[in-house]
Amino acid sequence: MKIAILVNEDTMKRCTGKGCFNAFFNRLDSFSDYGPEAQILGFTHVGGDLEHKIEKLKKNKVEAVHLSSCLRRRYSGYQELLERLSKDFEVKGYTHGRAILD
């Protein structure tokens, strides 16, 4: 499985990605169903030319996009983003922590 992770642009100014990468490499939380063949082919924020980024992910044969937990909590366009990405990818709405927001 080829995976990309999209994160919140503002959060990237202070985040190292440790939580997302820890969950991926240890197959925790949203990555728990993947086997050892899974690979991350993209890790980027949703700012800039998102359609260009989507085309690059498709060109690289990304199959699943995980929307980071910080994106879910802090991005006002989260639902629209989820719907847009669902046209081309399997989408998981978080990376680490709880799957559902209270």
Image (tube, rainbow, N blue to C red):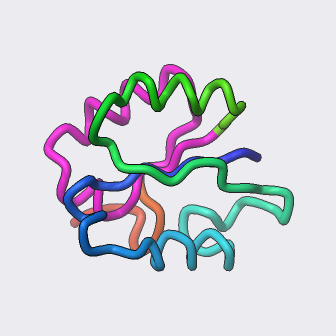
Residue at x 56%, y 72% (from the top left corner): 21
- Is 70 on the left-hand or right-hand side of 98? left
Image height of 54 relative to 62, above or below: above
Return the x and y of residue 64 as percentages of the image width and height. Answer: 61, 41
**60 left or right of 66?**
right
* The magenta stretch spans residue 97: no
Residue 89 located within the stretch drawn in magenta: yes
Residue 102 in the image, given as x and y percentages of width and height: 21, 66
- Between 11 and 22, the residue placed more toward the observer is 11
Which region of the structure is painted magenta?
64-92
Residue at point 47% right, 79% down? 18
Q: Which residue is drawn at 82% across and 62% down?
A: 35
Q: In this view, does 64 lie above or below 6?
A: above
Farthest left residue? Answer: 76
Whole-percent x, y for residue 12 in the image: 30, 64
- Please tell me in which quadrant of the rendered image residue 2 appears: top right
- The residue depicted at 49 percent of the width and 28 percent of the height is 54
